[in-house]
Image (spheres, grey):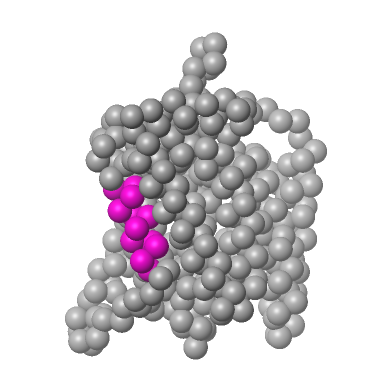
Amino acid sequence: MIIFLMPLASLLGISPDFDFSKQVILVFLSLLAFLAWLWHGLVSRQINIKKGYVEITMLLLVCALFLSAVFSNDSWGSFWGRPKVISEAFINMVALAVVFFIISFTFLKEDKEKAIRIFSFSAILAMVLGFFGINTIGSPICLAIFSACLVSFFIFLSAESEKWQYKLFFILGLVVSLASLFLIMQKPAQELYLSQKQSYLTAQKMLEGRMFFGAGQGTFSYNAGGVVFNRGISKFATDLGSTGILGILALLGFIISIFISGWKGRNFALLSFFAMQAVGLFFFNFYLAQLSVFFMTAGLINSVDK
């Protein structure tokens, strides 16, 4: 359900705040998933928990972000999002970690294949809605990044699929992704972004006296002649100032561990999709829909392939 809804959650109209609808869906469904997993484990008297380097890096990432929120300039905003940036809230990271662990612990090969098809349908629907000006991913550039990441994903899936109906479905996804990317690129840019230089200068200022933990999630702020930017040019630049050296190292460690896991498992479709998203973190900002897809992809890569 989370896999299907996160690219589309803003359509539910829970709140006029774009990311808040996604936050509500993410936290609520991750809690239900955790309770269901725990109940199943108690009833069957068997709780499966993987213990490996990937799981350790995820726990380190959660701990690093928890410390950033605790020592934040605005702990309330860093923990819950409001009145700061909702997509940066620590509660989101907890929910995403729960989703990651449940996928990693419980998904077998057939579950993974089904999840990929469900997500692919949701992603195609999100891009088609974008054709009509309904953007459920974030800003136009975020939708463009989402579409670009899906291109390699659908190329690998269409090449690897053995059943002709799935092959045609993934080819359709590839065509829609390319069309979405092309249409967005034809429109003139209407968004204002902080430059790379100013983003990192702001992050450097935020790290003064707070090198290890940063200033806290959602506290990035730069005033350019009355225009206030609450994000840097990229997720990496924003997190550098808000979560500090520990947060950045933990994120990089997690990304590297997923690459190792994916390469060992030969999950090239998922790995290419994850790689495109990981590269995007260094150049663009991600809304909650993209962050959710990023960590769900990591969970699928790390899941048991039997």
Prevailing SS of the magenta stretch: helix
Q: Is residue 60 left or right of residue 296?
A: left
Residue sitting at x 40%, y 40%: 244
On whether residue 107 falls in the magenta region, the answer is no
Instruction: Pick the residue in front: 73 or 245.
Output: 245
Residue sitting at x 59%, y 55%: 277
Q: Is residue 9 left or right of residue 179?
A: left
Q: Is residue 69 left or right of residue 160?
A: left
On whether residue 56 falls in the magenta region, the answer is yes
Residue sitting at x 61%, y 49%: 280
Instruction: Pick the residue in front: 24 or 248.
Output: 248
**Taking the image as drawn, is residue 99 in sight?**
no
Instruction: Pick the residue in front: 38 or 55.
Output: 55
- Residue at the extreme top of the image, as rendered: 225
Residue sitting at x 58%, y 61%: 274
Q: Position of residue 90 (x, y in %)?
A: 33, 46
Vertical side of 46 occupied by 132: above or below: above
**Taking the image as drawn, is residue 197 in sight?**
yes
Vertical side of 208 occupied by 103: above or below: below
Magenta span? 55-66
Q: Position of residue 130 (x, y in %)?
A: 66, 46
Q: Is residue 163 left or right of residue 111?
A: right
Instruction: Pick the residue in front: 1 or 51.
Output: 51
Q: Position of residue 55 (x, y in %)?
A: 38, 68
**Could you tell me how many numbered marks the image carries?**
0
Residue 96 location, quadrant: bottom left
Q: Position of residue 111 (x, y in %)?
A: 49, 79
Vertical side of 75 occupied by 9: above or below: below
The quadrant of the rendering that contains the N terminus is: bottom left
